[in-house]
Amino acid sequence: MKKSVTTIILLCVFLLPVKGYALEAIEVFSGYLKANIRDKNAYAGMPLFISFNFDAKPTFNTIGVNPKGDLHFIVEPFLNTIISPDNNVEIGSNFLIKYAYPLTKRLHPYVKGGLGVLFMTQHTREQSTQYNFLPQAGGGIHFFLKETIALSCEYRYRHLSNASFKSPNKGIDTNLILCGISFFY
């Protein structure tokens, strides 16, 4: 299982650019994540995401979908520092789709969603495994300072689960508030 997940991540990271998807943006996000877990204080931490945004319009155009805004495939490695209930880390990568639509020259709201994989060093009663999946969705806004640089803020909801590979699998529902800087090419 570990080898197949690692192989999928490596293929996605290295094959997306090779197949002609243009890298259109790199974003760096940090903020705060919080969830409630049983028998302990809140599960809380400080996330660090680096998002690589690839142009997804060519793929969607081949199936007849021609969005008016920007459409991206995102590969997003992360390292999250967990500060409660104990000091721990989460490490992994998210694979997302993001749609952004410019309201004005400076304001571009967006929605995103997808799936991630992670290894967590924290042991909880909710999860029997430390390897888990992260279905997630969220929305945010880019505020452009220049044509190629934006301040970005978003809310994201994620569900941490091992997809019922092993019991217990109660899941940990997490809310994230993120802010960062985005560099567009």
Image (cartoon, rainbow, N blue to C red):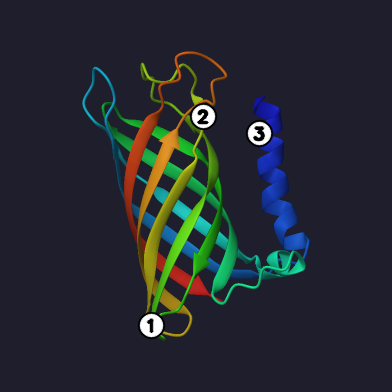
Amino acid carrying label 3: it is Val
Q: Position of residue 181 (x, y in %)?
A: 40, 67
Q: Is residue 35 left or right of residue 133?
A: left
Residue nearer the viewer, 20 or 141: 141
Please give the name of the residue rendered at 47% of the width and 28% of the height, measured from the top-left corner.
161
Please give the name of the residue rendered at 67% of the width and 24% of the height, measured from the top-left corner.
1
Q: Position of residue 34 (x, y in %)?
A: 28, 39
Q: In which quadrant will I find the C terminus?
A: bottom right
Amino acid carrying label 2: it is Asn
Q: Mark 1 vs mark 3: which is more N-terminal?
A: 3
Q: Mark 2 vs mark 1: which is more N-terminal?
A: 1
Q: Nearer the viewer, mark 1 or mark 3?
A: 1
Amino acid carrying label 1: it is Arg
In the displayed structure, 96 sits above or below 9; it is: below
Q: CA distance from mark 2 to mark 3?
A: 11 Å
**Local crowd at mark 2 within 10 Å, few (<14), some, or many (≥20)?**
many
Residue named by callout 3: 5
Residue named by callout 2: 132
SS label for mark 1: loop
Q: Position of residue 85 (x, y in %)?
A: 26, 27
Residue named by callout 1: 106
Q: Is residue 85 left or right of residue 8?
A: left
Looking at the image, the residue that sits furthest to the front is 64
Q: Mark 2 vs mark 3: which is more N-terminal?
A: 3
Q: Position of residue 119 (x, y in %)?
A: 50, 31
